[in-house]
């Protein structure tokens, strides 16, 4: 690593910390948003590396300007110049927006993220970044009509986008619509772990009370209905060639047949537990308004997430779904990676 490389690595680290401290400070106060915070931190680290790759690599610059940036200001200036020459680089505009945010140039950050959103109108991550930048540039950190429209479009494209749903709920509550905010946040209960869900329920209940509604029904402390026993294993041919990260996870999911993809009940297991047998019951129900025991039939499947993320991702491995009438007397057998019969 050259001296210039070391300088930029240090500056990139400072950029990440500054953006984390300033941009995510309002979210970190809310425990229910901390899952999203962790994802944003990782994205910022990648962004800093990408910024170096874009403007710190001689091949990325024309011959008259081939030099590694000595300071963050140099890096930003070179990126600005690069985008003047190639304004269709959406990732360049995203990196520039993050750099402006780190320097608290929030109006410029809003404009840069808006350019990225114009170039990527079908990318929900970009739309959410643009909406957030608009809110941060507002003196009261409020989402305006355009920011609201960006969040709504992001959710149309990806209904399980956690940050879009969280920010949309914040916007609705800011506008004096707490019932809408509670309704927007409630599906997140099915996407987060139990600890996060508990704190998120508190936020939802506060919004419901503000709207004159009763809090959500209390989460069941124990199974309130018959359980569904499920056995999960990897297909042997797949297991022989698969190399998994230590944070890979297996999600066992029961959902309403021919209904929405949101699970009715779900459990998360570590990859090291395979093969395993578990029991899904009302204690695993994710929505207080729908219990596993209330259904006459469910579709059961297992999903291996190599990232450990609760949201479905490209590259996840699935078992063939099995349709089961309840109450079931025999265990459900799920084989991840096996072609359906």
Image: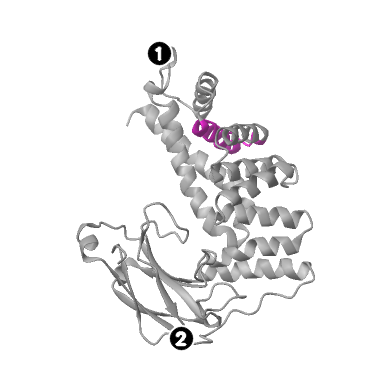
Which image quadrant: the C terminus? bottom left
Span shown in magenta: 90-106
Tell me the element at label 2.
loop
The answer, for residue 268, to whether it is visible in the render is: no
Residue 21 location in percent, x, y? 58, 47
Query: In the image, 78: left or right of 110?
Result: left
Front of the two marks 2 and 1? 2
Residue 114 location in percent, x, y? 62, 34
Query: What secondary structure do most residues of the magenta stretch adopt?
Result: helix
- The residue lying at 62 percent from left, 40 percent from top is 130
Task: Answer above or below: position of 83 versus 46.
Answer: above
Task: Answer above or below: position of 172 versus 279.
Answer: above
- The residue lying at 49 percent from left, 52 percent from top is 39
**Which class describes the residues within 10 Å of circle 2: few (<14), some (14-19), or many (20+)?**
some
Q: Which residue is mark 1?
A: 63
Q: Report the residue that reaches farthest toward the front.
A: 341
Is residue 123 a member of the stretch shown in magenta? no
Q: Quadrant of residue 29?
A: bottom right
In this view of the protein, which residue sits in the foreground, 114 or 294?
294
Label whose residue precedes the other's in the sequence (2 or 1) = 1
Residue 303 location in percent, x, y? 39, 64
- The residue lying at 48 percent from left, 81 percent from top is 281
Q: Which residue is mark 2?
A: 327
In this view of the protein, which residue sits in the foreground, 174 or 317?
317
């Amino acid at each position: 690593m050259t001296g210039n490389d070391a300088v930029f690595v240090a500056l990139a680290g400072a950029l990440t910390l500054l953006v984390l401290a300033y941009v995510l400070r309002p979210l970190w106060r809310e425990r229910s948003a901390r899952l999203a915070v962790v994802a944003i931190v990782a994205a910022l680290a990648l962004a800093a590396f990408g910024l170096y790759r874009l403007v710190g690599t001689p091949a990325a610059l024309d011959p008259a300007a081939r030099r590694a940036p000595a300071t963050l200001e140099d890096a930003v200036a070179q990126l600005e110049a690069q985008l003047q020459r190639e304004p269709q680089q959406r990732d360049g505009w995203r990196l520039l927006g993050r750099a402006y945010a780190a320097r608290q140039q929030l109006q410029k950050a809003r404009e840069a993220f808006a350019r990225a959103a114009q170039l990527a109108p079908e990318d929900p991550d970009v739309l959410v970044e643009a909406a957030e930048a608009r809110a941060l540039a507002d003196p009261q950190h409020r989402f305006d009509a355009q920011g609201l429209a960006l969040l709504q479009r992001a959710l149309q494209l990806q209904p399980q986008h956690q940050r879009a749903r969280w920010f949309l709920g914040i916007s609705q509550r800011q506008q004096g619509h707490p019932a809408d905010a509670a309704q927007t946040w409630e599906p997140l209960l099915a996407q987060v772990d139990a600890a996060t869900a508990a704190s998120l329920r508190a936020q939802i209940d506060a919004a419901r009370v503000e709207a004159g509604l009763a809090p959500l029904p209390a989460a069941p402390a124990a199974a309130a209905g018959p359980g569904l026993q499920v056995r999960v294993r990897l297909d042997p041919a797949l297991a022989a060639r698969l190399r998994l990260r230590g944070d890979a996870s297996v999600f066992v999911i029961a959902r309403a047949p021919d209904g929405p993809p949101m699970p009715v009940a779900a459990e998360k297991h570590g990859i090291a537990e395979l093969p395993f047998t578990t029991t899904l019951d009302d204690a695993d129900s994710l929505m207080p308004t729908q219990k596993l025991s209330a259904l006459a039939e469910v579709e059961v499947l297992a999903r291996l997430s190599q990232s450990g993320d609760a949201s479905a991702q490209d590259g996840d491995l699935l078992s063939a779904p099995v349709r089961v009438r309840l109450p079931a007397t025999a265990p459900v057998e799920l084989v991840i990676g096996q072609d359906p019969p």
